[in-house]
Image: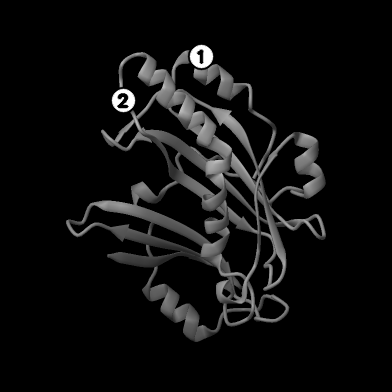
Amino acid sequence: MMHGGVLKLDESEAQICLDMRHGDGAPASAFTLRVAHADTRGFQSFAWSQRTRAAAARLACKAPAHALVRSLKPRGAPNTASIARARELGAERIGASLVTPDQCDSFGRLRGEHFLGRVSDSVPNFLSGWRAEMAADAAAQGVEVAPAGAVVEARLRFCAWPRAGELIEIHSGVAEVNEKTMRLCHWILDPERGGAWATFEVIALTFDTITRQTIAPSPALLQRMRERVIALAP
């Protein structure tokens, strides 16, 4: 079940919290959205109506504890993500695709879920080798594991919206490595003009699909992953 409320309302922007719960009421996932009240053609913002303000007041809420930011540090506006900058920093090109009409909204722009989908589809190209090494390392110790990845916290920032027929490339890098988690940065880029469609920062961990428990890599594997760290920022 999904519950929602308004955390903050400015002149033409709002912060909204969506709280997804299991059937027994336990937290499943939470989303905090920053949205702008803008026209659909030029994205020019304009003030909320009094009717909307009154409705927002009735929906005012505070974010539950499980919806608060944990590991992702607050940052300013998206940096200068670009094809050129990705190459300069050594980000890996892990995916590429074409936007098709069925993936676009009624205004002809790529729908939000497909930004995430592009990254999700491409990540195996980035981390499959790492997971295979973890499985082999465990097998050498007589333990069978089936490593998979899970994102436990994420921040998606939109920069522009591609339309049908336009191209997308995913350039990714490891930004930080801890004992059980990694901070990954994915730049969703426009290979034709060189700019950014979006940036996506995540806190990810590896877990065993057999035991459903988190896997901690060996010190040697941890060191090899730390050697992949680059200064890619969201």
> Which amino acid type is shown beneath numbered disc 2?
Glu
Task: Please name which of the two marks, 1 or 2, marks the residue nearer to the observer.
Answer: 2
Tell me the residue at 26%/33% (across/down): 211
Q: Is residue 90 left or right of residue 136?
A: right
Sequence-earlier tag: 1 or 2:
2
Which class describes the residues within 10 Å of circle 2: few (<14), some (14-19), or many (20+)? some
Residue with the most extreme left position: 24
Q: Label 2 belongs to which residue?
A: 144
Tell me the residue at 72%/67% (across/down): 166
> Residues at badges 1 and 2 in contact (C-beta under 8 Å)?
no
On the image, which quarter does residue 63 sit in? Answer: bottom left
Q: As displayed, is residue 34 above or below residue 88?
A: below
Q: As displayed, is residue 63 above or below residue 183?
A: below
> Which amino acid type is shown beneath numbered disc 1?
Ala
Where in the figure is residue 122, as x and y percent of width and height? Answer: 57, 48
Q: Which mark is residue 20?
A: none
- Is 81 in front, or is 192? 192
Q: Label 1 belongs to which residue?
A: 220
Tell me the residue at 54%/44% (across/down): 123
- Is 221 in front, or is 75? 221
Where in the figure is residue 6, as x and y percent of width and height? Answer: 43, 67
Q: Is residue 10 visible?
A: no
On the image, which quarter does residue 74 sit in? Answer: top right
Where in the figure is residue 168, as x and y percent of width and height? Answer: 68, 58
Q: As displayed, is residue 136 above or below residue 109?
A: above
Image quarter hosting the C terminus: top right
Q: Is residue 21 left or right of residue 17?
A: left
Where disc 2 sits, the SS reads loop
